[in-house]
Amino acid sequence: MAQPRTATPVAGIIALILVGGAIATAADAIMMFIGMYQTDVLADFRRSMGYYALMCVVVGFLTAIGIMLTRPRGPVAPIVAAISALVALYVGNRAGDLLYTFTHGSAPSAYVIEVLKPHFNTWDLIAPLTAGVIGGLRVAMVAGGLAPPRPSGPPFPPPGGHGAPYRPAPGQPLPPPSPGRPLPGEPPYQPSPYPPPYPGMPPESPQGGAPPNVGG
């Protein structure tokens, strides 16, 4: 039976999540920059909450997609992925906002401080929710492969219980007898009290006397 594969170390899973979070931060900053860019191309969509929800989904997906390459166990992977996605969204939004501001003119310090302040938005929960779902789905997918294998023997004892005498199936020959173990239905083996004859000597009589003289 094939042995189950071992789980991926927690340090390796966290490292992949952090790499995914860094990629998600850069992607979120670019999408924020595009959303703030002054152009008529898809202007209504880029300024809608649907576009912001798409940003949150992308951040959560990129943060947790590396978990699919691992074999996680327990709730560590989904929790770390959810927290990392929320941080990536926070940093990416503000990085994209400041990038657009500084590339299109100067920004007063008051504006920079206001942008860096934490602002809670209910839509922000989409990012950690997406990352947590991906991480939890991967944990559920590998849970069966990490379980200990079941015994391959029969779940119930044979008829008559364990240790019962062997009974061949109808039509099958009986096995050869062994010393001390008679076949079913035969009396126990009784060893002879007389020693076996040596080569070239006639067998002794049951009384132990000399054999009759048949040659003279």
Image (cartoon, rainbow, N blue to C red):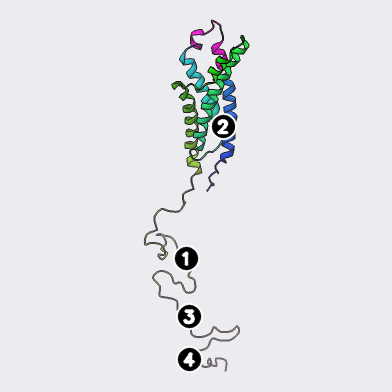
Indicate which disc, 3 or 1, sits on the residue closer to the N terminus: 1
Kind of element beneath mark 4: loop
What range is drawn magenta here? 30-46
Indicate which disc, 4 or 2, sits on the residue closer to the N terminus: 2
Residue for point 43% across, 70% down: 183
Q: Callout 1 environment at 10 Å: few (<14), some (14 to 19), or many (20+)?
A: few
Residue matched to label 3: 191
Q: Which mark is residue 17?
A: 2
Residue matched to label 4: 207
Most common secondary structure along the magenta stretch:
helix
Amino acid found under the numbered disc labelled 2: Ile
Q: CA distance from mark 2 to mark 1?
A: 64 Å
Q: Position of residue 119 (x, y in %)?
A: 48, 21
Indicate which disc, 4 or 3, sits on the residue closer to the N terminus: 3
Q: Nearer the viewer, residue 76 or 91?
A: 91
Amino acid found under the numbered disc labelled 3: Pro
Amino acid found under the numbered disc labelled 4: Gln
Indicate which disc, 3 or 2, sits on the residue closer to the N terminus: 2
Residue matched to label 1: 175
Position of 171 relative to 74 (above/below): below
Q: Callout 3 environment at 10 Å: few (<14), some (14 to 19), or many (20+)?
A: few
Q: CA distance from mark 4 to mark 2?
A: 94 Å
Q: Is residue 36 magenta?
A: yes
| Mark whose residue sits in front, 4 or 1 | 1
